[in-house]
């Protein structure tokens, strides 16, 4: 099971490190290895969140997530995305941006760093919405009941998460964005625009995937009723079509989540190297492990057995969202960001183990399946 799930990750690690050693020597090999560990530590909570969504998708879409999804994650977010950001912010062509990344690495790093306020605002708002929609939803299991119980009651106001996100965005624009260290000057307008874009992106992608998910569930219930009334009657295949649409938009939702999680990894990587190829290779290896870990959690049914893991991951998302907004002005060490997520997930895992022992069973069955960690 372990080798089957992580086999490709192990193979990519060996090939990637060997390639790094050949191209850049021992120093390049060490940098790629460090970047891989950095990506895994920063994105472990991402795997838990992804697993909560991926477990509702069939085997075909799980394979798409591991193949097409990893191509988007490695080449799209870790290689192409920084170049696109530089092209947009510096108002230059993509070819010129690539040339800059290869031949003038110091200036390229400076341009990417100057775009950090916009990136942080977009990612921060997207992740904050995921956390708020989770915390305001009524669910069977409550980890920190003293927080989650009153939040679930407040969540009956459908627009509350949007209101809070906009308030947080306004406060960020009027405080940390007024005198930014990255790029210098007042970035209030940039932060507001990027934050609203992140909020809109979440509402559109999550709204569409949620719509098709509801349609799929309704179709499944209707099909079950028809089968009970007339067992010999064959289905029309409509449910399969709806499943395809739902899975497609969930896949898009997963990719946007991964993009939001990768923002801090890409920016943090510049503290280690400004070579885009070393960066893409190192972060790409880490992204492979996050993908494999996601599938492992789904196939092992870990989220059903340890029912508080999703809670810990969402609290880590909330913390990351706040950290991203703070880093618009202030620098926070990557180790702090990574440790917060790891500690929260570890605590939620421990709480799940204690709960299972108290109830005299290895895992929580049935009821945990009603918990959807997608924030949709």
Image (cartoon, rainbow, N blue to C red):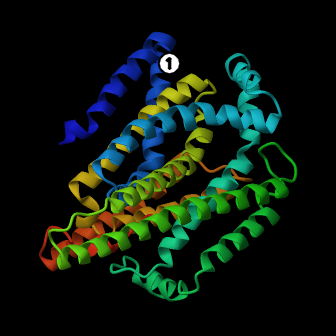
The quadrant where residue 15 appears: top left
The quadrant where residue 179 appears: bottom right
Front-most of residues 130 and 229: 229
Total marks drawn? 1
Can residue 48 be spotted in the picture? no
Q: Residue at x 48, y 47 (%)?
A: 42
Name the side, left or right, on which 234 lies relative to 41: left
- Residue 287's place in the image compared with 148, above or below, is above
The quadrant where residue 285 appears: top left
Q: Mark 1 = which residue?
A: 27
Name the side, left or right, on which 267 lies relative to 342: right
Q: Residue at x 39, y 51 (%)?
A: 47
Residue 295 image position (x, y, % from top left): 31, 48
Q: Residue at x 34, y 55 (%)?
A: 57
Q: Which residue is farthest left?
A: 360
Can residue 215 be spotted in the picture? yes
Q: Residue at x 22, y 65 (%)?
A: 305
- Residue 35's place in the image compared with 157, above or below, is above
Residue 32 image position (x, y, % from top left): 47, 26
């Amino acid at each position: 099971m372990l080798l089957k799930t992580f086999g490709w990750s192990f193979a990519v690690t060996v090939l990637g490190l060997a390639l790094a050693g050949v191209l850049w020597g021992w120093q390049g090999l060490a940098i790629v290895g460090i970047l891989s560990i950095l990506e895994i530590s920063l994105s472990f909570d991402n795997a838990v969140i992804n697993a909560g969504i991926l477990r509702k998708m069939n085997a075909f879409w799980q394979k798409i997530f591991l193949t097409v999804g990893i191509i988007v994650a490695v080449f799209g977010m870790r290689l192409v995305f920084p170049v696109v950001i530089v092209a947009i912010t510096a108002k230059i062509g993509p070819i010129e941006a690539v040339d800059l990344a290869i031949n003038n690495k110091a200036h390229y790093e400076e341009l990417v760093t100057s775009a950090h306020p916009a990136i942080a605002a977009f990612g921060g708002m997207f992740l904050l919405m995921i956390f708020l929609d989770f915390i305001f939803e009524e669910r069977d299991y409550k980890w920190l009941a003293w927080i989650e119980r009153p939040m679930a009651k407040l969540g009956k106001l459908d627009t509350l998460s949007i209101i809070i996100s906009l308030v947080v965005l306004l406060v960020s624009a009027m405080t940390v964005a007024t005198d930014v260290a990255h790029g210098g000057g007042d970035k209030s307008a940039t932060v507001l625009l990027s934050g609203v874009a992140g909020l809109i992106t979440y509402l559109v992608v999550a709204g569409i995937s949620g719509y098709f998910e509801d349609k799929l569930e309704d179709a499944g219930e209707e099909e079950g009723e028809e089968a009970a009334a007339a067992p010999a009657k064959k289905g029309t295949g409509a449910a399969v079509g709806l499943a395809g649409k739902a899975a497609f938009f969930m896949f898009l939702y997963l990719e946007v989540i991964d993009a939001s999680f990768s923002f801090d990894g890409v920016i943090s990587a510049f503290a280690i190297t400004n070579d885009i190829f070393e960066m893409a290779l190192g972060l790409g290896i880490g992204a492979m492990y996050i993908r494999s870990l996601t599938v492992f959690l789904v196939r092992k049914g870990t989220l059903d057995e340890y029912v508080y893991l999703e809670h810990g991951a969402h609290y880590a998302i909330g913390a990351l969202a706040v950290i991203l907004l703070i880093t618009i002005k202030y620098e926070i060490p990557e180790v702090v960001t990574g440790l917060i997520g790891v500690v929260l997930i570890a605590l939620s895992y421990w709480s799940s183990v204690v709960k299972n022992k108290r109830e005299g069973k290895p895992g929580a069955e049935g009821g945990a399946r009603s918990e959807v960690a997608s924030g949709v």
